[in-house]
Structure formats: C-alpha cells, structure tokens
Image: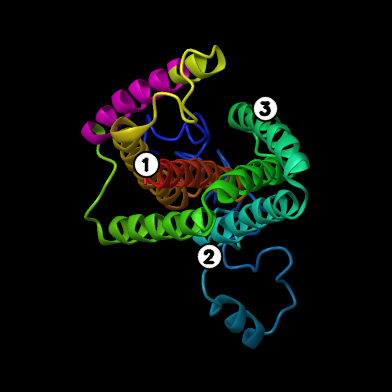
C-alpha cells in the first residue's frame, strides 16, 4: 500500500492480508498422512472415495480457483462496490436537486455534517461496514446536490461542467496510471503530503475568516487570481490522491486482501471523487464570478 496516501487506506489490512492456505501436512504426521484426513499415501482424500476414475480426472482438470473463488479482493469487486457508492451519491444528489432551494440548503448542511462524521467513522473502523459506507455516500450526495443547486442557480450550467470535468480528470488519471507514466513514488508522496498540509491550513484559515466576517467575498481568500491558483493546486492534489488510491487497490489485489476490503477501496475512491468534484465546481464558480 502506498504509505502516506489516502488515510482511508492507511492502517487497513491490504498488505500481507493473504488468506493462508491449509497446511498440506500436520506437524509430526508421517509422510503420506495429510492433515485433512490422515489418508495413507495413494488413497483418495475424504469426500473423494467412491468416485470413478473419470470423475476424478474431471475434478482435477478443472481450472485453479481464482481470487474471487477464494474470497479475495478483485478489481471487479472494487468496480461494482464503487459503482454502488456512486449510485447512492447520485440518489442523494437527486433529492436536493428536485426540492425547493431553501430545503436543499438545509439538506446540504445535514449531508455535509453527517458525511463528515461517517467519513471519520469509516476511516478509523478496522473492519469495513457496507451499510455505513453507503450511508456516507448518500449523505455526500445530499451535500453535493445542494451545493450544485446553489451554484448552478447563480452560474447556470456549472453543475454539468463540474460533472464532465470530474469524469475527465478521473479517466485521464486512470489512463496515466495504467500506462505506468504516473506512479505514487515515495518522493512524490512526500511532496504531496507537504502540499496537502499547506492546503489544509489555508482552508482552515480561510473558513475562519469567512465565519468571522473578516472577508465578505463568497469564497473568502479564494477569489480572483489567488482563488484560481489555489483551485488548480487542489485539483492536482485530488488527482494525485486518485493515483495513490489506484496504487493501494492494485497492491491489495496483488497481496490477496480479503474480499471485504473491496468496500474500503470503494469508500476511498468515493471520498476522493467527492473532493475532486467540490474543487472543480468551486473553481468553475470562481472563474464565472470573475467574468
């Protein structure tokens, strides 16, 4: 796993989580006596006695069990569960996009606070909970739908542009990762953590200034040229976070992580995509506001 990446993956049992196969021979058992039945050498194991030669040949000619057959995480698992999470995001967003603007604003606050709480719970939970992960996705949908509703009212079309931009960044990032041209190297991750720390500190200061009324701009210090530069930096950080997510998922599949951790992978991707969408729609609003 890429250390220092998405905190959702840190501490999870992706590395070294392979399921140990049963020991072929019990400790101290004579040669030819297997631990699963102590049948003498040459005798069919328990459950296979009484089978014809043709049946035995057919059984042993079957292909080896794949990761899905042995209860390990696969890329297909991650794709399916990520699609489920994004489906709940879309459902939540559909609610706030179809109600009145006042109710949408209230639901947006509920989604933001509830999503933040469940994000922390799911991040520090040792075992993934599908119900909590899907609940997080639904709450984030309420938040994103309300945010989109408010900004799209002021800047028509910005919501659709943000969706297209998010999907485009995701597709390009995935292609670059698959081609091997961009990787989460230790040096790159160190720079990422430094930049992320600086961005987080700036965001906290900006939020405090906005809440205390020191700045009256809609996005606080993130207005004008400074807002555009900070927005582009944030989108770059979110895109690199996707690279680290892909790296963690790839190592989890390679190391044979248990299948349940595909929910952890889906949760991590959902968190990063939500962050990416927020940064893109905010940058578009800033650009539209400067017109």
Q: How far apart are marks 1 and 3 (CA)?
A: 34 Å
Marks 2 and 3, Cα distance to the nearest angstrom?
Answer: 37 Å
**Residue 32 versus residue 106 in the image, above or below:** below
Image-based side of 134 in relation to 272, left or right: right
Q: Nearer the viewer, residue 91 or 240?
A: 91
Residue underneath mark 2: 66
Residue that appears at 54% across and 51% down: 24
The quarter in which the N terminus is drawn is: top left
Residue 281, image x and y in percent?
47, 46
- Residues 96 and 270: in front is 96
- State which region is magenta: 187-205
Tag 3 or tag 1, which sits nearer the N-term?
3
Question: Is residue 193 highlighted in magenta?
Answer: yes
Left/right placement of residue 235 relative to residue 14 reads: left
Q: Which mark is residue 13?
A: none
Q: Is the magenta stretch mostly helix, strand or loop?
A: helix
- Which residue was labeled with disc 3? 117
Report the Cα–Cα distance between label 2 and label 1.
Answer: 55 Å
The disc at residue 290 is: 1
Which residue occupies 69% across, 38% down? 108
Q: Which residue is drawn at 52% across and 69% down?
A: 64
Q: Which mark is nearer the camera, 2 or 3?
A: 3
The quadrant in which residue 175 appears is bottom left
Q: Which of marks 2 and 1 is nearer the N terminus?
A: 2
SS assignment at label 1:
loop
């Amino acid at each position: 796993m890429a250390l220092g990446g998405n905190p959702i993956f840190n501490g999870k049992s992706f590395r070294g989580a392979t399921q140990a196969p049963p020991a072929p021979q019990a400790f101290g058992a004579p040669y030819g006596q297997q631990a699963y039945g102590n049948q003498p050498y040459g005798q069919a194991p328990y459950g296979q006695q009484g089978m014809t030669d043709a049946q035995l040949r057919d059984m042993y000619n079957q292909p080896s069990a794949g990761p899905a057959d042995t209860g390990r995480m696969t890329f297909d698992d991650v794709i399916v569960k990520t699609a489920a999470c994004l489906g709940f995001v879309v459902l939540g967003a559909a609610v706030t996009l179809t109600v009145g603007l006042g109710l949408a604003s209230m639901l947006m606050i509920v989604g933001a606070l509830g999503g933040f709480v469940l994000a922390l719970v799911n991040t520090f939970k040792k075992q993934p909970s599908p119900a909590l992960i899907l609940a997080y996705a639904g709450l984030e949908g309420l938040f994103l739908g309300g945010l989109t509703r408010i900004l799209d009212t002021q800047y028509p079309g910005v919501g659709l542009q943000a969706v297209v931009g998010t999907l485009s960044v995701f597709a390009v990032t995935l292609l670059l990762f698959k081609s091997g041209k961009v990787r989460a190297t230790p040096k790159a991750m160190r720079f990422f953590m430094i930049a992320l720390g600086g961005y987080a500190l700036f965001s906290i200061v900006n939020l405090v200034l906005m809440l205390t009324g020191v700045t009256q701009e809609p996005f606080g210090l993130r207005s004008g040229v400074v807002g555009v530069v900070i927005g582009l930096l944030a989108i770059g950080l979110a895109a690199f976070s996707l690279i680290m997510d892909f790296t963690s998922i790839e190592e989890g599949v390679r190391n044979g992580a248990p299948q349940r951790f595909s929910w952890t992978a889906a949760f991590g991707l959902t968190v990063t995509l939500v962050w990416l969408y927020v940064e893109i729609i905010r940058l578009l609003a800033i650009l539209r506001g400067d017109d």
